[in-house]
Image (cartoon, rainbow, N blue to C red):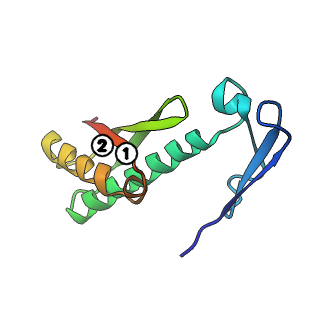
């Protein structure tokens, strides 16, 4: 399997602008710029997209393990917080809340800690990754 995404940029770094698109067209010429990346503006940025990808991957990994254990989740909600220091991504913190009938808090933490290390996006990253979990 291969997935593709593309980026287009016009102009210099500070005043230029670009767009990103994905094979699925969920992102379709979605605007990004220096302002949306390092200041405050309307549009996306690479770090936000990485955090979204990590949140999605991690949540699916938790669901897979729970389902394989015979305790499929009713719902899972994850927030991925990416931290940058200067021009370095220094970590991602994953915070998940779940409704999972028939599971203890301790088991949920065990499952989420495993997914923190083993989801596909986590394995691709070379930064510190932490997580916290809470049953609802």
Q: Residue at x 55, y 34 (%)?
A: 87
Q: Is residue 104 above or below residue 4?
A: above
Residue beneath the point at 40% across and 37% down: 91
Residue under label 2 = 99
Q: Identify the residue at horizontal 64%, vertical 65% (top origin).
A: 4
Q: For mark 1, give the secondary structure.
A: strand
Q: Nearer the viewer, mark 2 or mark 1?
A: 1
Report whether 43 appears left or right of 54. Answer: right
Where's residue 59, x and y in %? 39, 50
Q: Is residue 80 visible?
A: no
Q: How would you rate the neighbour count of disc 1 (Cα within 10 Å): few for under 14, some for 14-19, many for 20 or more?
A: some
Q: Quadrant of residue 119?
A: bottom left
Q: In the picture provided, is 17 more to the left or to the right than 75?
A: right
- Residue 76's tag is 1
Identify the secondary structure beneath mark 2: strand
Whether residue 135 is visible:
yes
The label shown at residue 66 is: none
- Image-based side of 54 in relation to 136, left or right: right
Placement of 36 over or under 29, stated as above or below: above
Categorize mark 2 by other alpha carbons within 10 Å: few (<14), some (14-19), many (20+): some
Is residue 114 left or right of 122 when viewed as pictured?
Answer: left
Picture coordinates of residue 82 (x, y %)? 47, 36
Residue pictured at 58% horizontal, 45% vertical? 49
Question: Residues under labels 2 and 1: Cα distance?
Answer: 6 Å
Q: Counting residues from the N terminus, which is met first, the one under dot 2 or under dot 1?
A: 1
The residue closer to the viewer here, 16 or 40, is: 16
């Amino acid at each position: 399997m291969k997935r593709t995404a593309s980026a287009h940029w016009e102009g210099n770094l500070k005043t230029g602008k670009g767009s990103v698109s994905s094979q699925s067209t969920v992102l379709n010429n979605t605007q990004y710029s220096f302002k949306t990346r390092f200041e405050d503006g309307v549009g996306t940025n690479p770090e936000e997209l990485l955090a979204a990808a990590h949140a999605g991957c991690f949540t699916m990994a938790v669901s897979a393990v729970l389902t394989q254990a015979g305790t499929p989740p009713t719902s899972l909600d994850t927030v991925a917080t990416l931290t940058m220091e200067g021009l370095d991504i220094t970590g991602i913190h994953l915070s998940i809340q779940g409704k999972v009938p028939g599971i203890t808090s301790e088991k949920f933490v065990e499952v989420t800690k495993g997914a923190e290390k083993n989801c596909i996006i986590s394995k691709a990253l070379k930064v510190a990754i932490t997580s916290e979990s809470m049953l609802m």
